[in-house]
Image (cartoon, rainbow, N blue to C red):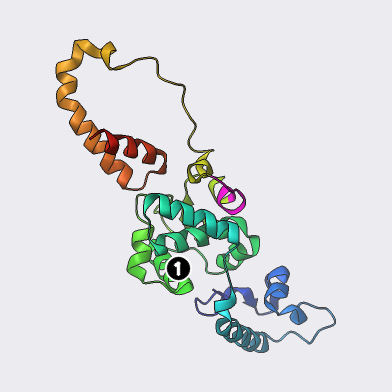
Amino acid sequence: MLVPLGGHREFVAAHGLMNDALAEAIGLGEWVDPMGPEYDPRAVRLALRSLHAAAERSRKRVTVPERLRANTARLAALVGRSETDRRVLEFAVRIHNERLLDDTADYLGPLSSAKVFHALAGLLELPEREVRAALGAQGRLTLERNGSDLLRGKLDLLSQKFADHLLSSEGDPVGLLRDTIAPSRAPTLAAHDYAHVESFLAVVRPYLRDALLRYCERDTLAMVRLAHFFEGAR
């Protein structure tokens, strides 16, 4: 983000680096050390470009945390999502949980939706059209479209705790949504309780079933089991 997307323009200021912890993490610690060389923004930018080139050469060895990878794979398998959906979701989860990644993205400044698509496509090495589809109106991850915002703010997850669950929890994929979806009490009414509107239900029920199936197929995890129920009732 700092080099290919231009974040270095804000991070490398005229009189010093803007984030000491980030500088230490990426290998520029000598430039924030009081005993280090005299600060020179041009030299820092050259060093940053060199570090970026080295990181690019070894990027194949960088992996997503195993639990996060496993959880996103479970969700993708459950609802039939693409590899692009999974990778964009993984990035969003990490930027919501990892402070330095979030801090780094802040140096890109406020981004429009179009710039978010471009940034994610470049960072994740994915086709931009696929990133646009992954950030559509349906699903676990959507794009905040109320104007420009910092990258983390533009990536709108289902709930405040969803990212933490994906990164730290393990188990049933639907259980990952436990702060969003709560089980209801067992129903007390049955079809025979609605005999007075049976003629109306006979017309409406097929439309309701098909509408729910289409809704479920469009990525609503909470309704997956309901979709299976209706499929079995055909």
Viewport quadrant of the N terminus:
bottom right
> Is 168 contained in the magenta span?
yes
Residue at which label 1 appears: 120
The structure residue drawn at horizontal position 56% and vertical position 78%, both measured from the top left corner, is: 59
Q: Percent from the top left, x then y, of residue 186?
A: 44, 21
Q: Percent from the top left, x then y, of residue 173?
A: 49, 46
Q: Percent from the top left, x then y, of residue 154?
A: 46, 57
In the figure, 168 relative to 180: above or below? below
In the figure, 103 relative to 193: above or below? below
- Residue 42 at least partly seen: yes
Name the amino acid, label 1: Leu
Instruction: State which region is magenta.
Output: 164-171
In the figure, 184 relative to 105: above or below? above
Name the side, left or right, on which 139 lies relative to 179.
Answer: left
**Tag 1's secondary structure?**
helix
Dot 1, crowdedness within 10 Å: few (<14), some or many (≥20)? Answer: many
